[in-house]
Amino acid sequence: MSMNFESTTTGELRSETNPAEADPLNGKRQTPAISSPTMDRLAARLKRHKVTRIGIEFLDRCADIHLKDLVIDDMDDHRRARILGRTVVNFGSDSFLGLDRDERVQKAMIEALPTWGTHNGASRAFSSVALCAEAERRLAEWLGVEDTLIFPSVTLANVGMIPALVGKGDLMVVDRLSHDSIHQGTKIAIANGAKVVELHPCRGDALESLLTAEGGNCAITAVDGVYSMTGKVPPLAELDEITRRYGGMLYCDDAHGTGVVGVRGRGAASMALPSLRHVLLIGSLSKAFSCMGAFVTCSTELKRILKIRSSTFIFGGPVPPPYLAAICAVCDILDSPEGDELHQRLRGLVKRLTDGLRTLDLIVCGGAAPIISVQVGDIEDTFAAGKRLFDRGYYVQSATYPAVGLTEGLLRVQVNANHSPEQIDGLLEAFADLKGQFKLPLRSAQRTSPAA
């Protein structure tokens, strides 16, 4: 794909509202309609909530540096993107293997269109296209499990699966640091009568103490496979062994490990456990797979039960057929020597970046997955540091509260297999300059601190 990479200056953050909207009937520009008083009253009521008000005020104050709600105007095959009027290297994409640009994946989608159209047009409770059964079979084959069940997204999988698995009288343990969608699912489970207790810290000894204190059988222990913000991996083997000893099953949201961690990308749980047949593994099909949807590993019998009990399976809609064809194409790639080479390249780039950041004495987390975080701290400092990198030509994500703790802001870098070593080195140079301009926390200071 070609792009015009002429040098431009940094533009202002664009507003969501446009003073002139296109007329859908004749294509002419027209003045927007006067806003609705009813909508205005609703907005005013919502803005009275403390968290909403503080959030809006903060974003307004940091409008020139927060880099949120961006629009990407163009991109190429090597993660160069045009954002805010300038060309930057995009280190904010979770299409880790670069398969969104792969001709085989794109071809599979295109070739599925004449037969299957753009959408199935029915809840899967009524019907699924044959491609869906094929994709679930291929995923199970790739992971070495009996079966899988596809959902429209990881969020819908978690929100629908957890209430389907635990109900009145059941005990569920949930890692406090697990993904928000897991916690949303637990709220429904609690409303249905389940008892949910939080695990923190997420360690085997803490889980054992908690389950001993509860004095009952555990239904599931829900954790992340790879923490989405930091790239860290919890002790899955310990958690699995203790959970099963107390009669339960490990529920692992491995969205950020799917396709990139472990042998042939089978995920963080595949590295920690002897088999995936005894764990409920939630995987993403929209990150490393560069497609759409999510899956859960299961037995064929459990799959039938989940189809009845999971509301988001019934009411969430299907994954469009072209993406199902693309999922099959990605499975072929992952289960091939070429996929092994792709993983080797990605891991080499991740190591190049993490080694370089540690050489700069920065506090770095992650590395098992292609998510690497650099600690900053203060929210506004985190925004400003991310904007400074952006001005140098590198976009990374400034992750702040509530995604992380209030004083635990970090720069979140996502490495892709279609980044180049030169782009990694350029980002490291930008971090070296950033270190000189900002008082970033240092590893050496952390080691010598009395509290360390």
Image (cartoon, rainbow, N blue to C red):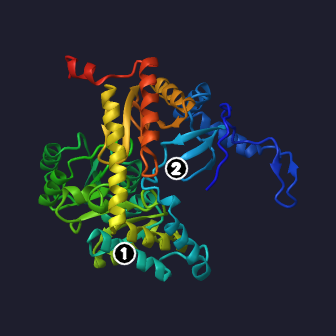
> Label 1, on which residue?
138
Give the secondary structure at mark 2. loop
In the image, residue 281 sits, relative to residue 124, either above or below, namely above
What residue is drawn where x is 14% and y is 54%?
A: 242
Dot 1 and dot 2 residues touching (CB under 8 Å): no
In the image, residue 342 sits, relative to residue 378, either above or below, namely below
Residue 82 location (% of width, % of height): 62, 43
Residue 389 at least partly seen: yes
- Along the viewing direction, whichever of 272 and 164 lies nearer the viewer: 272
Left or right of residue 22, residue 292 in this image = left
Give the secondary structure at mark 1. helix
What residue is drawn where x is 23% and y is 39%?
A: 201
Query: Counting residues from the N terminus, which is met first, the one under dot 1 or under dot 2?
Result: 2
Most extreme residue toward the front, as rendered? 422
Looking at the picture, which amino acid does disc 2 mark?
His
- Along the viewing direction, whichever of 65 and 302 lies nearer the viewer: 65
Left or right of residue 114, residue 230 in this image = left
**Quarter in which the C terminus is drawn:** top left
Would you call the spot at circle 1 few (<14 residues within 10 Å), some (14-19), or many (20 or more)?
Answer: many
- Along the viewing direction, whichever of 446 and 217 lies nearer the viewer: 446
In the image, residue 126 sits, relative to residue 148, either above or below, namely below
Left or right of residue 5, residue 194 in this image = left
Residue 370 location (% of width, % of height): 37, 47
Would you call the spot at circle 2 few (<14 residues within 10 Å), some (14-19), or many (20 or more)?
Answer: some
What residue is drawn where x is 48% and y is 38%?
A: 397
> Label 2, on which residue?
78
Q: What separation in Å lies between label 1 and label 2 (alpha carbons)?
A: 29 Å
**Quarter in which the N terminus is drawn:** bottom right
Left or right of residue 435, residue 221 in this image = left
Residue 94 location (% of width, % of height): 45, 50
Residue 189 location (% of width, % of height): 35, 57
